[in-house]
Image (cartoon, coloured by chain):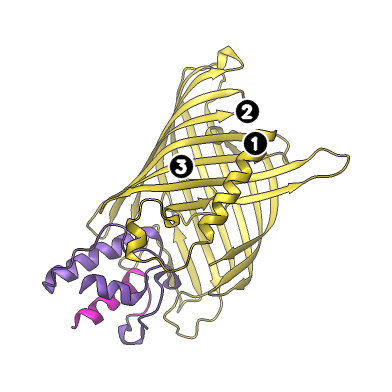
Amino acid sequence: MSLETEVKSMILQIADRPDRPDDLPGDTVLSDLGYSTNMANKLANELQKIANNHQTGAVIQPGSITPSSTVDECIAATS
Amino acid sequence: MNKKLYLAAVLLLAGSMASAQTAKRTKADSTSILSLDHFKLQNTFNESGKKPSPAEFEFTIPDKKPKSWLVNAGLSYEIDQTATLTSKIVTEFHLNTMVDKEQENFSAGYAGQWLQKDGDWQSLVTFSGKYGRDWKDSTHSAEVTGNYTLFKSIGGFRLNAPGYLANDAFTYMLTPYVGFEYQQIIQSGNSTQTGAIFRGLYNLSGSFAINKDNHGNLLAPHKLIEATVDYTGRDAFGNGTGNGEKGTHLLQTGLSLYLVDAKSASVALGVIYNSGSNPMQGLKEQKFWQMSLNIQLM
C-alpha cells in the first residue's frame, strides 16, 4: 500500500468513515470528517508510525495536525 | 456592574478575534507564539473529552425595568503542546440574571490535558489550578480540579469521539468521566464559609443525533436534530466550611433542531432544561428552561 493511501485510510479510520481512500480528495479539511482536537492528536501519533514504517525520516511536530489541517497536509507531514 | 460589563466585552472581543481566524492553519502558524490560532472561545473548560459548547451572550436593556444578562464564556490561550500534554491559560465568566437564583462567577488560571500516546483505549486526563471569584457568595477561592476518562477513536465502539450508525442515519457520542474538585475558600463575606471542600464527582453524558441523508458521502453527515444528556453527581465528602454542602447533582438536557448545517455555517434552534447546581461555577440549586438560536460560522 502506498504511503498516500495508508495515510488516507488512517484518516478515515479515526473518523469512523468508510474505508475508501481513493475517494478522499486531498483538499478535504479534517473537521469536515468530524475531527476533534483529540482525534487530530491521535492521527498525528498514527502518522508518525506510518512515517517510521516507510522510513521517510519525517517527524510530526506536536500540534502540527489539527482539525483544520487538510488531507494533503497530513500526507506532506508524513512524507 | 461596570467592571463585569468590561469583562464580558473583553471576552466577546477576544472571541471575535479567535473566530475570525482563517479556517486553514499552517505549520508556521502553529509554532508562532502569539498566533490567534492559540486562542479558543467556548462555554466552559470544566469538561473532559466533550465537543466544546459555544459561548453564550444575551442581554436586554429595558428603559424602566432592570437589565438582564446571560454570559457563559471561557477564553483559553494555548501556551505549550507536546506529543501528549497540552497546556493553556484559561479564564471563564458565568453571569446569569435571567434565573431565580442569579449566578455571577469568574475563574482564571492554568488548565492542562494529558492524552496517553498509544493504545486503542487511551487515558485522557484533564486538570486545572485556578483562582475563583463568586460575587453572589462574596467568596475568593483557590481551585484544583482533575478529570479522568478514556478516549477510543479506532474500532467499533467509540468513546469521546463521534460514531455513526445505520449507514450514517445516526450520530452518537459518549463522553462520561470521573473526577474531583478541591476548593479552598480563602476569603468570604461570611466567616463561616471559609475552609476547604473536597468533592468527588462522576459525569454521565452523551449525544444522539438523527442525520440528513448523506448519500454515501465520505464527509461526516449533517445533523437534523440532536438530543444531549449531561448528568453530574458530586459528593462533598470533605467539607471544612460551614456551608453545609453534601451531595449535589446537575442534570442538563438539550434538544437542537438544525435549521442550517452547511460547510460554512450552522444555525440551530436549541432548548435546554437545567436541574440542580454546580457549586464551583456558582450555579445554585434550581430548575429552568432556556431557549436559544445558536449560530456558528465555520
Q: Compared with residue A24, is residue A57 higher up or lower down, i.e. above or below?
A: above
The image's mark for residue B4 is 1
Q: Residue furthest right?
A: B64
Three-letter amino acid code at the position of disc 3: Val
* Viewer-nearest residue: B237 or B240: B240
The first of marks 2 and 1 along the sequence is 1
Residue B10 falls left or right of residue B32:
right
Residue at figure coordinates x 84%, y 44% from the top left: B62
Query: In this orientation, does residue B288 appear?
Result: yes
Q: Compared with residue B180, is residue B123 higher up or lower down, i.e. above or below?
A: below
Q: Chain A takes which shade in the image? A: purple
* Viewer-nearest residue: B2 or B133: B2
Pinpoint residue B283: horizontal percent, then vertical percent: 61, 36
Q: Quadrant of residue B264?
A: bottom right
Pinpoint residue B74: horizontal percent, then vertical percent: 53, 45
Q: Which residues are magenta?
A: A1-18
Instruction: Name the residue that disc number 2 marks.
Output: B135
Chain letter of the residue carrying label 2 = B
Distance CA(mark 2)–CA(mark 1): 10 Å
Task: Tell me the crowding category of disc 1: few under 14, some 14 to 19, or many 20 or more residues within 10 angstroms, Cα based.
Answer: few
Residue at figure coordinates x 23%, y 68% from the top left: A47
Three-letter amino acid code at the position of disc 1: Lys
Three-letter amino acid code at the position of disc 2: Trp
